[in-house]
């Protein structure tokens, strides 16, 4: 089978003899890791993947190539990724620093919990989220610009 990277701006193919051997990763199984699957889909930015009605079948037919994962995601001296890796590199809609906080789900969740607890919405009568203008490390963009700025390092 010929795999193509599902990131819209990437042209890597698994059968391309011109390119060095590229490793392709399957997406997280949404039945077991639904939150992580949604983060991957959001970061990948592929409209066809986002429009899939059945995530259970889509995670089997889409692949993402290895160039979209930072060294923070890799096991030392291995080609394997850590279990909770998140794609962070060369993604069309994701503009956050390449650090451990953005690369691993466990750190992403900790940062998200800290962010949610640091937001004071009591003074804002109409708390809204503008997903289009949010370029914070957190995909959900749950905070005000001031609170988002506290997390970026």
Image (tube, rainbow, N blue to C red):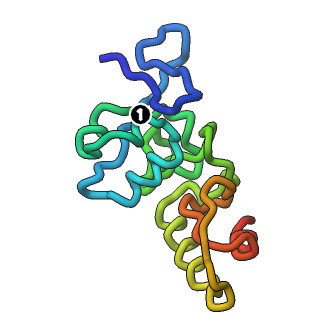
Say which of 48 and 5 sits in front.
48
SS of the residue at dot 1? helix
Q: Nearer the viewer, residue 30 or 119?
A: 119
Residue corresponding to mark 1 = 48
Residue visible at 41% across and 13% down in the picture? 15
Instruction: Give the x, y percent position of residue 4.
Output: 43, 23
Q: Residue at position x 68%, y 73% from top?
A: 144
Vertical placement of residue 56 versus 131, above or below: above
Quadrant location, the C terminus: bottom right
Looking at the figure, which quarter contains the N terminus? top left
Q: Residues within 10 Å of mark 1 (few under 14, many from 20)?
A: few
Q: Which residue lies furthest to the top in this view?
A: 18
x then y, percent, for residue 141? 60, 64
**Where residue 86 sits: x, y (%)?**
50, 51
Q: Residue at the front extreme? A: 125
Taking depth in this image into account, of 140 and 108 the one nearest to the observer is 140
Q: Where is residue 43 in the image (x, y as percent from the top left)?
A: 53, 47
Q: In this view, does 66 lie to the left or right of 48?
A: right
Q: Residue at x 47, y 41 (%)?
A: 78
Q: Say above or below: 10 vs 113.
A: above
Camera-side residue of 44 and 101: 44
How many marks are shown on the rendered structure? 1
Q: Which residue is drawn at 56% across and 54% down?
A: 103
């Amino acid at each position: 089978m010929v795999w193509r990277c599902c990131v819209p701006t990437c042209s890597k193919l698994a059968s391309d003899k011109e390119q060095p051997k590229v490793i392709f990763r399957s997406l997280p199984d949404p039945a077991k890791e639904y939150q992580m699957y949604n983060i991957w889909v959001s970061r990948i930015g592929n409209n066809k993947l986002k429009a899939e009605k059945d995530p259970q079948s889509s995670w089997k037919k889409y692949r993402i190539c290895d160039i979209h994962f930072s060294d923070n995601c890799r096991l030392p001296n291995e080609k394997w990724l850590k279990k909770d890796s998140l794609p962070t590199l060369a993604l069309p809609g994701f503009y956050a620093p390449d650090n451990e906080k953005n690369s691993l789900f466990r750190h992403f969740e900790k940062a998200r919990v800290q962010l949610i607890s640091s937001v004071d919405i009591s003074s804002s009568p109409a708390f809204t989220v503008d997903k289009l203008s949010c370029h914070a490390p957190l995909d959900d963009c749950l905070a005000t610009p001031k609170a988002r700025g506290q997390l970026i390092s």
